Amino acid sequence: MNIGIDIGFGFVKATDGQKQVIFPSVVGEGRNIRYNTGINDNSIMDNLMLQLEGNNYFVGNLANRQSDIVMSTLSQNRVNSIENEILFCTALGLLDPLGGVNIVTGLPVNEYSDRFKEKLLETLRGYHQFSLNGSHHNIKVSNCKVIPQPFGTIFDQLLDDQGKILNPDYANITLGIIDIGFRTSDFAVADNLEYVDKMSSSSNIALSSAYKLIARELNAEYGITKPLYQLDQIIRDKQIIINGEEVDLASLKEKAFRLTAQNIISEVSTLWNIWEIETILVAGGGGIALYDYLSSQLDNIMLVRAGQFSNVNGYFKMANRSW
């Protein structure tokens, strides 16, 4: 079976072409929850529990709700970290493949080096034994390929599900990709599908930059401290409950998103001669969130509708092309 997996700083995404899964990139210590009312939502995705090498972990939303200590993949050294292995195994378990699997995944542009690639390949290849929500898995990763993350979006646009070229026009133009994730944004250029290294880079200005602005304002105004990984739903809802009262965050969100988009445009403008780029693809969950602010200042840009799944869909298509 061929699989695409994207272990992002904000969310993990994975697909086997038939099923897509997504969950927050948060790992916490497992603990005994002494009481369950049996009334609240018991969906698997909200209650991910992984056992690995004799240790119990909560993953995703469950870690956010129940763990005192959480590990969020915000370090560049995450490729061989225990939390990376936990997130990877959780994604594998949710897809529940039969037999061996082949995987394509990606690294941010600035982490795409031989050292990080080899570390990641070493971590992913071979057998993975774990239990997810009580179900035991022993999955062998037979083949693995690591590509620059933004090229997942290019392959998603270029290839069909079997990995054959669907849109040859993308192979004959200069493409720019603005891939806005949670902690990092990747900027890449492909000229006739050749990766232009000098015009490709990563930035720490991403969706979390807007979240940090909102978190600072909440702390200054209301004395509230919220970790970034707990802000996502609050920002989506544009409100927070404080002492039983709804506080509207719409204007604060608009300000934070607008400033973050302006900073991203400034970074892109120093990296590219934008007039040379024939089409700019905007991808990632942050791309969807910030697209309206970007499109008001950049020409020739197009939102990739797959959003958070644009890279991982491309990984899957490249896996089908490779094996």
Image (cartoon, rainbow, N blue to C red):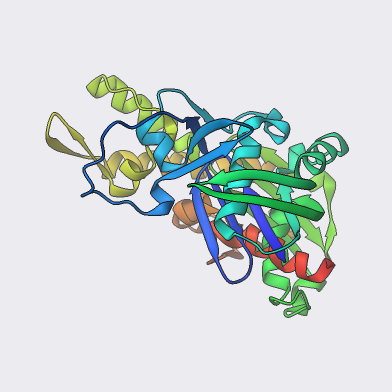
Q: Residue at x 64, y 59 (%)?
A: 312
In the rendered image, the quadrant that contains the C terminus is bottom right
Residue 319 x, y percent position in the rendering? 77, 64
Look at the image and tell me whether residue 51 can be seen.
yes
Residue 250 image point, x, y percent? 27, 45
**Residue at x 31%, y 38% (from the top left corner):** 252
- Can residue 281 be seen from the camera position used here? no
Locate the N terminus and report the quarter of the image it occupies: bottom right
Q: In this image, 198 relative to 81: left or right? A: right
Question: Could you tell me which residue is drawn at 51 percent across and 34 percent down?
Answer: 57
Q: How many marks?
A: 0
Instruction: Give residue 2's quadrant in the image.
Output: bottom right
Q: Nearer the viewer, residue 132 or 260?
A: 132
Nearest the viewer among 230 and 201 is 230
Question: In the visual, does 18 lie left or right of 107?
Answer: left
- Which quarter of the figure has residue 104? bottom right
89 and 260: which is toward the camera: 89
In this rendering, is residue 138 above or below 320? above
Q: Residue furthest left?
A: 244
Left or right: residue 173 compared with residue 32: right
Q: Position of residue 230 (x, y in %)?
A: 38, 35
Residue appearing at x 72%, y 68% in the figure = 317
